[in-house]
Amino acid sequence: MKSQIKRSLKFSLTIAVITFVLAAIFTIVSSSILSGVVWIVGLLIVLVIVIIGVLFDMLGIASTAANEQPFHAMAAEKVPGAKEAVLIIRNADKFASFCNDVIGDISGIVSGTATAIVVLQIADLVGEGEGSTLQIVLSVVLTSIVAAITVGGKAIGKYFAINASTTIIFFAGKVIAVVENKLKINVLPKNNKKNNKIK
């Protein structure tokens, strides 16, 4: 029991640190990019950030909905991505936490910050100062649109995550296989007894 609590606390602390670092990086990068582009490009960047959040949310849900059985035969035949797909499903709690809580929440925060920057760009373009009526209206409208796209996108993503979980996780497994084999970056844990049983 104590070991489980210790592992849980260690994982939570690791996720918190990773979230802090990634949030800082994403915010700095997105703010730097947005400061040097016109507002219409800024809106496109906001849309890309939202889409990233939606896709990772879908991945996280698919990992908890997928069944590992279809991948065993493929893993035995050394099909690229099959073994990684099994690992994703066996570590669905951690994988979903990273996709939904880390990337998903960071995307939401960064998209909000990016939207605020775009609002200021538009207000400056038309000669309206900070705190003007136009800025307030733009802030409300754009924030509402971004929120609607995010929620609607995640709703659609959940549908596909549940009904096409095998296809989604297999694709994710292929991507991770490429990253691990070509770039030599370990993405998934492989050092416990449960994971070592994959044929």
Image (cartoon, rainbow, N blue to C red):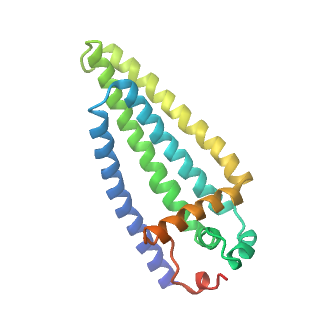
Write down the quadrant of residue 199 in the picture.
bottom right
Residue found 38% across the figure and 58% down from its top: 19
Residue found 54% across the figure and 52% down from its top: 56
Looking at the image, which residue sits at the far front? 182
Image position, residue 80 (x, y; %):
62, 69
Image position, residue 30 (x, y; %):
33, 41
Q: Number of callouts in the render?
A: 0
Image position, residue 83 (x, y; %):
62, 73
Write down the quadrant of residue 27 in the picture.
top left
Residue found 25% across the figure and 21% down from its top: 130
- Could you say which is closer to the camera, residue 3 or residue 101? 101
119 on left or right of 145:
left
Residue found 24% across the figure and 17% down from its top: 129
**Whether residue 163 is situated above or below residue 41 in the rendered picture:** below
- Could you say which is closer to the camera, residue 23 or residue 43? 43
Image position, residue 25 (x, y; %):
31, 51
190 on left or right of 38:
right
**Whether residue 133 is situated above or below residue 1 in the rendered picture:** above
Write down the quadrant of residue 77 in the picture.
bottom right
